[in-house]
Image (cartoon, helix red, strand yellow):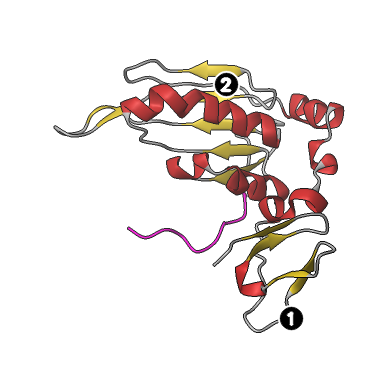
């Protein structure tokens, strides 16, 4: 298995209920849950619901599962639905389970326990709009300060470009040592 080379766009899922609304669904897998930039990219592309089918181990599930799901919901103001495998797969691997649905405020709407089960919750898109309106995080993001993480861009220049003057002492940072920079921040390594 190889990792993907790009983040896909959310898909639109039509409601099966009469008069129901469609929802924009961002698709991830369990390891994607660990990277806030992934879910932010999906949110910026219009996701209202983030999904993470998963097989967390028991140890990592106990420590990280719920807190990561709730964090992705809160920081992106999205619903999160995570179907999770549970039980023993073989002598060396057991999955944690605990499928759940989380709302954009971080409240757990539905959850399964240790064994097999089904977690079902309504997605109130009016509530989603209310959360986003009351705390407009997307508008308040500071790409000028942390643009690398927010935009997913790699900066660093090409070798052979002019060095960057640093401070008033005449010190320079060669571009091949630059990790990233913003108008107010420079991060470099000393090679």
Q: How many marks?
A: 2
Residue 55 in the image: x percent, y percent?
35, 35
Is residue 108 something that shows in the picture? yes
Quarter residue 187 falls in: bottom right
Query: Which residue shows up at 70% across the image and 23% down it?
Result: 105
Of 154 and 50, nearer the camera is 154
State which mark lies toward you, 1 or 2: 1
Query: Which residue shows up at 50% across the image and 24% down it?
Result: 66
SS for callout 1:
loop
Residue 152 in the image: x percent, y percent?
65, 57
- Magenta stretch: dominant secondary structure: loop
Which mark is drawn over residue 121?
A: 2
Residue 33 in the image: x percent, y percent?
51, 39
Of 92 and 101, nearer the camera is 92
Quarter residue 1 falls in: bottom left
Residue 107 in the image: x percent, y percent?
63, 18
Q: Is residue 2 magenta?
A: yes
Q: Which residues are magenta?
A: 1-10
Give the side of residue 8 with respect to residue 111, left or right.
right
Which mark is drawn over residue 162?
A: 1
- Distance of label 1 from label 2 (alpha carbons): 56 Å
Outermost residue, left side: 91
SS for callout 2:
loop
Neighbourhood count class around disc 2 (C-alpha, 10 Å): few under 14, some 14–19, many 20 upward: some
Give the side of residue 144 with respect to residue 116, left or right.
right
Of 3 and 112, nearer the camera is 3
Give the answer, above or below, for where 42 lies relative to 98.
below
Is residue 46 something that shows in the picture? no
Quadrant where the C terminus is found in the figure: bottom right
Q: Is residue 190 magenta?
A: no
Query: Which residue shows up at 69% across the image and 55% down it?
Result: 148
Give the answer, above or below, for where 182 lies relative to 114.
below
């Amino acid at each position: 298995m190889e990792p993907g080379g790009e983040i896909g766009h959310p898909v639109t899922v039509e409601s099966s209920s009469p008069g129901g609304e469609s929802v924009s669904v961002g698709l991830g897998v369990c390891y994607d849950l660990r990277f806030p930039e992934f879910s932010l990219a999906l949110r910026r592309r219009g996701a209202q619901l983030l999904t993470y089918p998963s097989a967390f181990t028991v140890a990592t599930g106990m420590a990280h599962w719920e807190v990561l799901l709730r964090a992705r919901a809160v920081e992106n103001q999205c619903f999160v639905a995570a179907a999770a495998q549970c039980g023993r797969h073989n002598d060396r691997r057991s999955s944690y389970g605990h499928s759940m649905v989380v709302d954009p405020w971080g409240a757990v709407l539905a959850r399964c326990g240790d064994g097999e089960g089904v977690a079902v919750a309504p997605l109130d898109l009016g509530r989603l709009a209310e959360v986003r309106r009351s705390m407009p995080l997307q508008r308040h993001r500071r790409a000028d300060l942390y643009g690398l993480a927010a935009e997913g861009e790699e900066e660093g220049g090409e070798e052979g470009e002019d060095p960057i003057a640093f401070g008033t002492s005449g010190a320079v940072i060669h571009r091949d040592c630059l990790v990233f920079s913003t108008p107010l921040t420079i991060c470099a390594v000393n090679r």
